[in-house]
Amino acid sequence: MNATYQHAVVLGLGASGVAAARLLRAEGTAVTVMERVASPAVEASRGELASLGIQVMVGEGGLPPDSFDVCVVSPGVPVTSPWPLEAQARGLPLLAELELGWSRRGPATKVVAVTGSNGKSNAVKWMTEALAEAGYAVALGGNYGPPVCRVVHEQRDLDWLVLEVSSFQLETTRTFHADLGILLNLVPNHLDRHGDLETYRAAKARLFAHLHPGDVALVHEDCSAWLPPPPPGIAWRTFGRSAACDYRYQMGRVEHGAQVLADLSGSYFGNEVLGVNAAGVLGALDEGGLNVEAAVRVAQVFRPLPHRMETVAEARGIRFINDSKATTLAALSAAVRMCGGKVRLIAGGLLKEKDLTAAKEVLAQHAAGVYLIGKASEPMASAWSAVTQCVKCDTLAAAAETAWREAQPGETILLSPGCASFDQFRNFEERGERFRQAARALTGET
């Protein structure tokens, strides 16, 4: 039976905090929401929640002295920040918004949860569309899509709930588990929040911390070495490229033992980078006794999410690809490999990593030039100029124009920054939209 609460405090007034507060209030819980920074969006949410009888407090003070029995934590609030630490000191259990919503799913609803450093959003989009194609009642939520609390509040009679889960969301989970859990990959990311790689890994590993007999875990072969061994009764499967994997990607096909499970040639996932992720997704469907053929049909017409290897313009035999979501060097390198042929790369912004040498090999092989923007221009030029032409352009518009002027037919102009966007843009979406506008202006497209 799900726990019920008399009085809850919710930390954070973003989409997740609002969804958690509304769900709890609908259950009869008295709710207080805390937010540190005032903004027009916060004021709008404050008014909306106040009309439901929810108290909203904005400012830097401590938690109110009320007698709370749970503290719901939005993913944007680090567990090391003052409010969660104060809650723990007062003996309040921390509860992730993800877990609160998951605990309120319908009794017949099964859950797919996908985590990893790269490729999560398109993986869950594909999984959701594949389950819908197979005739299931399915909804998508979590880190991509609406918050889980909102999904379960609005849709109770689901066959499947497909969740993208981030390390931020997993930090405060206590019982959360999925019928099908997938760890796509892991490379250093969000170390500004987690502090070090081990803490980041530990957060991701929480996806498998509370598995029940009958649950299935799909794990990238490179992650197996640092994950704790699974408990008895758990179907623990690996995927990747080696022959030792339970599900492996080779030359456009996903294989399971001697069986060709699926042929993805010509689809968005039919390449050496996304093919491995596809092996994890199709492996999960196969282990769950679900319709792999429906997933292959969807893959052939799949449209990726905006700002993730999105073709935004093409002229003179030159493609413009928007991969603004790529904020790590691993994602940058993967994007360059996916393009095929020579690439004019636009990179830069706020670096999240110190070692830039990991990208040198792929740039030496594939880059016709690198056009650098933002604060990372100088260190990137210093690291990569020995293997490819590096041009410091300062702005995104100047980088796109210079790359277009120098590009040859058959080449790709790729925005894959390998950095956060906040030195020049509000977010990666604004950065990608600016690139889309520049590409269409240069090619004359509308």
Image (cartoon, grey):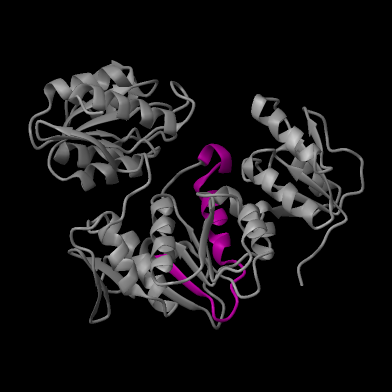
* Residue 75 horizontal/vertical position (percent): 62, 45
- Quarter of the rendering occupied by the N terminus: bottom right
The picture quadrant where one finds residue 46 is top right
Q: Write down the region rendered in magenta.
A: 191-220
* Residue 446 horizontal/vertical position (percent): 26, 28
State the residue in front, 314 or 16: 314
* Residue 269 horizontal/vertical position (percent): 27, 57
Specify the farthest residue to the left: 409
State the residue in front, 329 or 26: 26
In the rendered image, the vertical position of residue 34 relative to residue 229, given as above or below: above
In the rendered image, the vertical position of residue 65 relative to residue 219, given as above or below: above
Residue plotted at (23% across, 82% down): 258
Q: Is residue 157 magenta?
A: no
In the rendered image, the vertical position of residue 334 relative to residue 133, given as above or below: above
Residue plotted at (64% across, 46% down): 16
Apparent side of residue 219 relative to residue 36 in the rendered image (left or right): left
Apparent side of residue 231 relative to residue 342 in the rendered image (left or right): right
Q: Is residue 196 magenta?
A: yes
In the rendered image, the vertical position of residue 400 relative to residue 244, given as above or below: above
Apparent side of residue 296 relative to residue 138 in the rendered image (left or right): left
* Residue 163 horizontal/vertical position (percent): 52, 58
Residue plotted at (46% across, 22% down): 423
